[in-house]
Image (tube, rainbow, N blue to C red):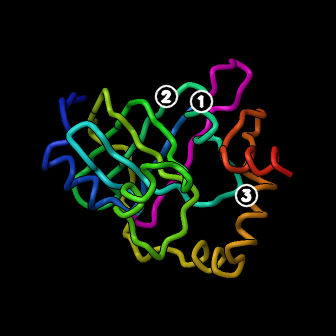
C-alpha cells in the first residue's frame, strides 16, 4: 500500500495545502534523549520547491525541534487526511533553523501571514517522500483555528515574548542548545 514519490508534485502539494494540521518529529542523537512529536497548524506550512518545504515555528513552551535540528538535522513531517479520501504523506529530510537575525529570514518570512508571530522558520530539504493508505485515521471535520496563540502573543507583547523565550526556549528538555539569539543575549549580559 505504500508509495514513494520523487518530488512534491502538484497532487502532493494540493493535498498538503488542504490539511489544517501536520505533525513534526525529531530526536536527539543520545539514546537517553527524548524523541519529540509536535502538532502544528495555523496555516504555517509551505511547499517551496520540488524537494523543499518550510514552516513557521511559533513561540511555545519547548524548543525540542530547534535543538534537535541544530544537533543532527533529522526531521520527518507527517500529514494525515482527516477529511475526504484517506491518505498519509511523510516528508523525511534534513532541517535547518532560520531565526529573525539570519540573513535569509526576510525572504523566508515573507511566505507567511505577516500578522502571525513566529520565533523561527524550519526549512526542510526533503530526501524521502512516502505515502500510505491512512485507512486507520478517523474522519474529523475542521471547524476553525484556535485564537489563543495569537491572543497570548498579543498580550505578552514584544518584550514579554522575548523574556518568555529567554526563560523557556534556551535549551531542550535534554539540555541541548536551541534558539541562538537567547544564548547570544545571555553571553552579552
- In the picture as drawn, the residue positioned furthest to the top comes out as 31
Q: Which residue is drawn at 77% across and 53% down?
A: 168
Between marks 2 and 1 in the image, the one whose residue lies nearer the viewer: 2
**Percent of width and height locating residue 37:** 57, 42
Quadrant where the N terminus is found in the figure: top left
Marks 3, 1: nearer the viewer: 3
Q: For residue 1, say whether it is visible.
A: no
Query: Residue at point 45% right, 54% down?
Result: 105
Query: Residue drawn at (58%, 58%), measured in percent from left and top?
Result: 119
Can residue 42 be found in the magenta stretch?
A: yes
Residue 107 as seen in the image, left or right of residue 168: left
Q: Is the magenta stretch mostly helix, strand or loop?
A: loop
Q: In this view, does 25 lie to the left or right of 171?
A: left
Residue found farthest to the right: 189
Residue carrying label 1: 27
SS of the residue under disc 3? helix
Name the residue tied to disc 3.
165
Neighbours of disc 1 within 10 Å: few (<14), some (14-19), many (20+):
many
Residue 143, compared with residue 58, is above or below; it is below
Q: What stretch is highlighted in magenta?
A: 27-43
Residue 20 in magenta stretch? no
Give the distance between the C-alpha atoms of the residues marked 3 and 2, in whole angstroms.
23 Å
Which SS class for mark 1? loop
Q: Is mark 2 on a helix, strand or loop?
A: strand
Amino acid at each position: 500500500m505504500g508509495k514513494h514519490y520523487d518530488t512534491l508534485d502538484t497532487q502532493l502539494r494540493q493535498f498538503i495545502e488542504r490539511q489544517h494540521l501536520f505533525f513534526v518529529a525529531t530526536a536527539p542523537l543520545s539514546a537517553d534523549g527524548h524523541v519529540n512529536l509536535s502538532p502544528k497548524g495555523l496555516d504555517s506550512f509551505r511547499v517551496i520547491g520540488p524537494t523543499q518545504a518550510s514552516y513557521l515555528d511559533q513561540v511555545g513552551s519547548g524548543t525540542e525541534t530547534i535543538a534537535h535540528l541544530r544537533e543532527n538535522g533529522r526531521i520527518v513531517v507527517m500529514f494525515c487526511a482527516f477529511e475526504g479520501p484517506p491518505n498519509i504523506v511523510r516528508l523525511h529530510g534534513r532541517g535547518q533553523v532560520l531565526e529573525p537575525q539570519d540573513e535569509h529570514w526576510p525572504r523566508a518570512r515573507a511566505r507567511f501571514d505577516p500578522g502571525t508571530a513566529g520565533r523561527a522558520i524550519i526549512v526542510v530539504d526533503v530526501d524521502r517522500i512516502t505515502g500510505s493508505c491512512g485507512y486507520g485515521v478517523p474522519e474529523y471535520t475542521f471547524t476553525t483555528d484556535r485564537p489563543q496563540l495569537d491572543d497570548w502573543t498579543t498580550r505578552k507583547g514584544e518584550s514579554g515574548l522575548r523574556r518568555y523565550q529567554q526563560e523557556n526556549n534556551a535549551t531542550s528538555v535534554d539540555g541541548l542548545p536551541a534558539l541562538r539569539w537567547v544564548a547570544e543575549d545571555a553571553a552579552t549580559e
